[in-house]
Image: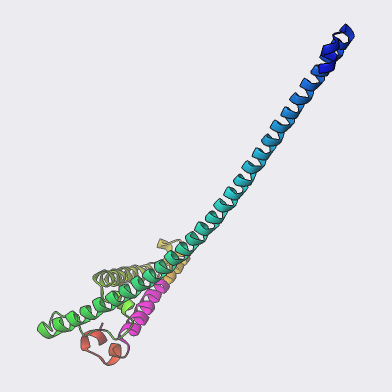
Amino acid sequence: ASSIMQNGSPRDLETFKLLETMEDHTGSSGDEFSLESDSNSDLDDEAEQFSRKEMRLKAELNKYEGLLRADEHKLHEVEKLQKRRKDELEEEIEGLEQTLEDLLQNLENLESPETSRGPVPPGWRKLRFVNSPWFTLLSTAVVVINVVVLVLEMTHRHRPRNHHSHSGENRRKFFWLDQAFLLFYVVELLLRAALYRRDLLIGPLRLVAW
């Protein structure tokens, strides 16, 4: 390029300008290639750092998920143990309350035998409702109703047939009422027998003559 400038001919000047243009273009292309290579290298580094960070976060996530499952399992075991212990305590409290009730009844029998409820029944405790006031009231009401039905039935039987056109239907009604009363008496007897056992037959007079 310097020899062309020294000769100074127009044609040589054009050639010199063309060479300069080519040199500038080559230099700019090299710079662009260098910048592109640097940019690709930076992207690769960022991608690698992101991948490592993602793997580290996933490992920590798996770790904490495992700890969470372990804690949940421990909590479930503690709740089961607590529930079992609670059931045991409730059962123990119920047993103590029943024992206290029996002792109080025995004390009542000793202090005032005239008004006492009698000895503690040896049968199943849940059957003691047959001694409750409401069951006694129910039994008394059934007996009274049964007496009324018996009176009506006897009155109906001694009426002349021409005064009652539905005698057959009424007899069936009285029959099924009698069966219902009989069923109630049988159930009551079985409940008392299961509660008092042999005391129902050879026990205190108050129980035998119920």
Of residue 141 and residue 123, the one placed in the foreground of this image is 123
Residue occupying the far left of the picture:
111
Is the C terminus in the top left, top right, bottom left or bottom right quadrant?
Answer: bottom left
- What secondary structure prevails in the magenta region? helix
For residue 175, what is the image quadrant? bottom left
| Residue at image coords 69%, 37% | 40
Q: Is residue 139 above or below residue 11?
A: below
Of residue 102 and residue 194, the one placed in the foreground of this image is 102
Could you tell whether 23 is left or right of 189 in the image?
Answer: right
Q: Is-magenta flag for residue 183?
A: yes
Q: Decide if residue 81 is in sight here.
A: yes
Q: Position of residue 146 (x, y in %)?
A: 33, 71
Question: Which residues are the magenta region?
Answer: 178-197
| Residue at image coords 25%, 85% | 207
Q: Is residue 113 above or below residue 153?
A: below
Q: Is residue 23 above or below residue 210?
A: above
For residue 165, what is the image quadrant? bottom left
Of residue 17 and residue 52, the one placed in the foreground of this image is 17
Q: Is-magenta flag for residue 118?
A: no
| Residue at image coords 24%, 84% | 120
| Residue at image coords 87%, 11% | 12
Is the N terminus in the top left, top right, bottom left or bottom right quadrant?
Answer: top right
The coloring applied to the image is rainbow
Q: Tag count in the figure?
A: 0
Q: Position of residue 118 (x, y in %)?
A: 20, 83
